Image (tube, helix red, strand yellow):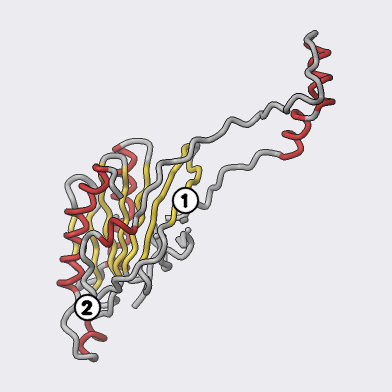
């Protein structure tokens, strides 16, 4: 069984857990931190005094609290991505039904902010990432990208199961390697699910039934139930 990362390479969601199911989509383009020396210089009493003298204004007393030059960033609303998976009724014959703590990660990509909520089960066989993008079109492009043709050999193979959704995304299942990926959208939300399982050869050797039908049912349930939860905000 192999695991894949949130946007196309081998790795699950460990980077989120990960950042943040960074848990399934971590950013490699973090926001540039504020130069602490510049901030201190602007905030110091001496610097404020020099600035006031040049401007011809009165200088605040040193007992006055320093004025912050950094605007506070509003924190995103809190969501629990694990609630999206526990709500589908996980089939424990293929996937662990025990989930870890939810993870939230906020990063800056292309000059915009991206917040991702993620969760994975205890053995890493089922993970979900829910990312808020600037608009519906960006979400669809994100969902389509993760299941594009260049990933089909890896994620479905010659015996794979493929499905595309009319509103963006779809799923790819490879029964020979035991990996699968699903993406879809809910408005400006882009959802990525990765489901990993014992491949058909291992299942046969252990006397188990073919896991692929269970994987398909699980992905179908996710596609049916998760949009309603996201739209309601109750997750």
Q: Which mark is residue 93?
A: 2
The residue lying toward the viewer, choosing from 77 and 170, is 77
- Image point 61% across, 42% down: which residue? 32
Please provide percent x and percent y for residue 122.
Answer: 37, 72
Question: Which quadrant holds the N terminus?
Answer: bottom left
Q: Quadrant of residue 35?
A: top right
Please provide percent x and percent y for residue 109.
Answer: 48, 43
Alpha carbon distance from label 2 to label 1:
31 Å
The residue lying toward the viewer, choosing from 217 and 56, is 56
- Left or right of residue 188: residue 57: right
Secondary element at tag 1: strand
Secondary element at tag 2: loop
- Left or right of residue 10: residue 93: left
- Left or right of residue 4: residue 178: left
- Image point 79% across, 11% down: which residue? 58
**Residue under numbered circle 1:** 105
């Amino acid at each position: 069984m192999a695991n894949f990362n949130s946007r196309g390479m081998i790795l699950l969601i460990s980077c989120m857990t990960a950042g943040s199911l960074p848990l399934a989509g971590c950013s490699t383009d973090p926001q540039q931190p504020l130069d602490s020396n510049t901030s201190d210089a602007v905030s110091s009493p001496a610097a404020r005094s020099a600035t006031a003298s040049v401007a011809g204004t009165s200088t605040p007393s040193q007992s006055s609290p320093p004025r912050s030059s950094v605007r506070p960033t509003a924190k995103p609303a809190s969501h629990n991505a694990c609630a999206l998976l526990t709500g589908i009724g996980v089939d424990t014959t293929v996937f662990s039904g025990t989930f870890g703590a939810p993870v939230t990660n906020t990063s800056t990509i292309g000059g915009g902010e991206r917040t991702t909520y993620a969760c994975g089960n205890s053995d890493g066989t089922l993970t979900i990432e829910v990312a808020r993008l600037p608009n519906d079109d960006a979400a669809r492009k994100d969902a389509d990208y993760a299941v594009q043709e260049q990933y089909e050999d890896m994620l479905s193979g010659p015996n794979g199961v493929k499905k595309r959704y009319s509103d963006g995304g779809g799923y790819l299942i490879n029964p020979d390697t035991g990996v699968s990926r699903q993406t879809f959208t809910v408005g400006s939300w882009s959802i990525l699910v990765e489901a990993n399982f014992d491949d058909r050869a291992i299942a046969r050797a252990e006397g188990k039934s073919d896991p692929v039908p269970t994987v398909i049912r699980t992905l179908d349930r996710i596609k049916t139930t998760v949009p309603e939860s996201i739209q309601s905000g109750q997750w």
